[in-house]
Structures are given as C-alpha cells and as structure tokens.
Image: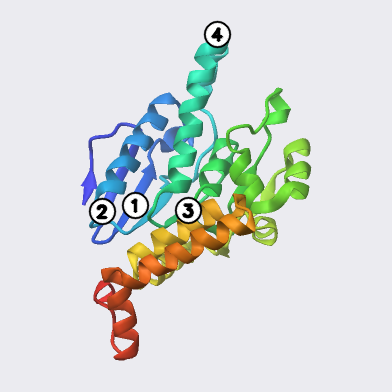
Amino acid sequence: MSDKRYETISVEREGKLARLWLDRPDVHNAFNSAMIRELRAALRELREDAAVRVVVLSGKGKSFCAGADLNWMREIIRFSYEQNLQESLELADFLYELYALPKPTIARVNGAAIGGGAGFLSACDIVVASAEAKVGLSEVKIGLVPACIAPYIVRRIGESLARQYFLTGERIDAHRALEIGLANAVVEEVRLDAKVEEIAWLLLSSGPEALAGCKELLRRVPGMGFEEAKRFTAEMIAGLRVSREGQEGMAAFLEKRKPKWAE
C-alpha cells in the first residue's frame, strides 16, 4: 500500500515491511529542506506503526541520493549563520532518528550515493548495494566538509579510512565500499531486490523487542565504561528473559516450534 501524502518521498507498506523512497528521480533524489522534513515525519509514523517491523530506504530511478539539491544550495548560500545552523540541525536530527530507529533498517543502494546520501546509507543498519553503485564524500571539493554525516561514516569505516576519503574526496565504487564496511553486501542490479528481501525475512524471523534491544546495545554500549556496561547489559537481558516476547521465544526454542512473531 502506497502513501501519497508526501511530495518528495513516498512510503509503501507491504505487511510487516515498509519501503521509504526518496522520490525525486528527476534530480537523482537530491535532498532539500522539504525532503528532510518529510523524511522525519515518515520516520515518526513508521516508528509508531506496530505493524511495521523492518524499514527499507532507497531511491526512485537510477540514483540512491545525489546529495544536496542544487537549487537548495543556491538558497542557502545567501542564508545567515543562524539560518544555516537551523537547516543543518534538521539534517543532523534526521540522521540520528534514522540511526536510532528501534526497528531494523536496510539501505537499498541502487545507484550513486553522494555527500549526504552517503550519510543516509551509513545511518542504516544494513547496506545492500548494486554493483553499479558509487559513494562520494566530495564536500571538500566545494570548500565544505562531511559534517553532519561524519558520526555515521566514522562508525562504519573507522577514523583511518574516514581521514582518507574525507580529505581526498575520491569516489568509492561498490566493491571498495564492501571492503571498507560502507556496504554489507554487493550484488548485481538484477539481484538487488532479492537480496534485500532475503535480509528482510531474516530480520522478520527475530523478535521485534530483541531487535530493538540490539539496536540500543549498539547505540549505547560503545560509549560506556566496563562498570556501567556490566549493569546495563545485565539489566537488559534480565528484562528480556521475563518479558512476554522472551518467554515466548525461549518456550518456542525448547518446544522446537516457530515463535509467534515468525508465523
């Protein structure tokens, strides 16, 4: 089922799976302030929709996301510092909301992912890229930096590689993206949807509360000391063991049957 309320994106729900499309193919899905606002609104709805358990982010047409829209850039070049700060905070908020969404996210990278587009895929949990896809971190070529996307790129590829690609601005092909951790899988374009579906079904076979707990672990534990992490992780697993989902999952395992969420 497709949601037609948006102008720059579209949302399709297929049972437990939601597809969130960047839908400006005529400009290679370049983003502007309107798209960021609509993406944030769509994420809020998907977060609250209990029927949706996995979200796939992709771009309509030939590109995933070509970065910032040129017409938007013509506007913001005249903005004050305060106006630019507000626009940048909107983008930073969206990236964090995508990263922290308690439901698994898959980036279906069907083509070029440039600048902010590289940030969009890096904020997702799992990245499946077409063999024809390319990633660009070329902000320095126009006197800018990959600022808002930096936390997510660095988490994926580490500081050493981030230094290389942030400073040189060189393009990264799909196979190199796989080597350095920007992508989790690379397939021929004709197999892109099949690979995304395969991963989506793996995710849907797992407990939704457990998946949300995994994402919270991944988000919070790296910033903790061992003492804090000991308590936090022990409390999380104890809570899940006595939860309805945990009880059902352990019972299903012991009884050699599928848990209810996977039926």
Q: Nearer the viewer, residue 143 or 41?
A: 41
Q: Element under label 1? A: strand
Report how far apart the C-alphas of labels 3 and 2 lie in the structure: 16 Å
First-in-chain label (3 vs 4) = 4
Which residue corresponds to mark 4? 80
Residue drawn at point x = 51 percent, y = 33 percent: 92
Report how far apart the C-alphas of labels 1 and 3 lie in the structure: 10 Å
Report how far apart the C-alphas of labels 2 and 4 lie in the structure: 40 Å
**Which mark identifies residue 13?**
2
Residue type of the residue flagged with mark 4: Ser
Left or right for 6, reference 168: left
- Callout 4–callout 1 Cβ contact below 8 Å: no
Which residue corresponds to mark 3? 107
In the rendering, at what x and y percent does residue 80 appear? 55, 8
First-in-chain label (1 vs 3) = 1
Q: Quadrant of the C terminus?
A: bottom left
Report how far apart the C-alphas of labels 1 and 2 lie in the structure: 6 Å
In the rendering, at what x and y percent does residue 122 appear? 56, 48
First-in-chain label (4 vs 1) = 1
- Callout 1–callout 3 Cβ contact below 8 Å: no
Report how far apart the C-alphas of labels 3 and 4 lie in the structure: 33 Å
Judge the density around disc 3: few (<14), some (14-19), many (≥20) Cα neighbours within 10 Å: many
